[in-house]
Image: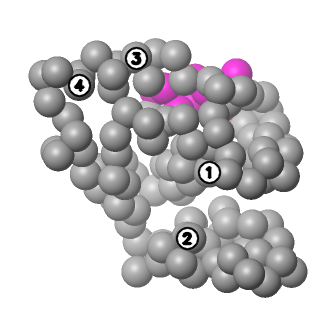
Amino acid sequence: FWIDKCCIRQGQPELMKLCILLIEEFIQLCDGMVVIFNWSYLTRLWCVYEWACFLVFHEPEDLTICAGSFYRDSTEALFLEAVRHFSVDACQCSVPADRDILEQKINGYYCSKGHFERFLQIT
């Protein structure tokens, strides 16, 4: 069971850089993905990038979405709003330098932010 934040050594910059470069390979080799999904999930650029990469390589049924404790009639509008208004530019990165890396990956693999955003909204 691979948890990105735990399995990529956060205090070793060279190892982190290598792991970030290979993130797509890690995701391709995994058997499944578990997402603890709430309406703020779509505001975190690393999260949505990993989600999209996973669905490029795997079937949707290999993705387990845990939203039960967050999804209620009273929060449904928050979920729908997050999907409808998803944008790469509005996403946050806890490490500012990661934004440049991820935007390069998005433009390289998905051809543009717009294509990536549409893919994410559809999935």
In the rendered structure, the answer to whether residue 94 lies left or right of residue 33 reads right
> Where is mark 2, residue-wise?
4
Q: Is mark 4 on a helix, strand or loop?
A: loop
Residue 10 in the magenta stretch? The answer is no
Q: Which residue is drawn at 33% across and 22% down?
A: 78
Residue 55 image offset from top left, x and y in percent? 49, 49
Amino acid tagged 2: Asp
Residue 106 image offset from top left, x and y in percent? 75, 41
> Where is mark 4, residue-wise?
75
Which stretch appears magenta? 114-122
Q: Is mark 3 on a helix, strand or loop?
A: helix
> Who comes first in sequence, dot 1 or dot 2?
2
> Where is mark 1, residue-wise?
46
> Where is mark 3, residue-wise?
81
Q: Nearer the viewer, mark 4 or mark 2?
A: 4
Q: How many residues crowd mark 1 within 10 Å: few (<14), some (14–19), many (20+)?
A: some
Tell me, yes or no, if residue 48 can be seen here.
yes
How far apart marks 1 and 2 lie (CA) works out to 10 Å
In the rendered structure, the answer to whether residue 42 lies left or right of residue 99 reads left
> Who comes first in sequence, dot 3 or dot 4?
4
For the residues labelled 1 and 2, say whether their Cβ atoms are less than 8 Å apart. Answer: yes
> Who comes first in sequence, dot 4 or dot 2?
2
Q: Which residue is drawn at 69% across and 77% down?
A: 10
Residue 103 image offset from top left, x and y in percent? 79, 41
Name the quadrant containing residue 74.
Answer: top left
Q: How many residues crowd mark 4 within 10 Å: few (<14), some (14–19), many (20+)?
A: few
Amino acid tagged 1: Trp
Front one among 79 and 34: 79
Q: Is mark 2 on a helix, strand or loop?
A: helix
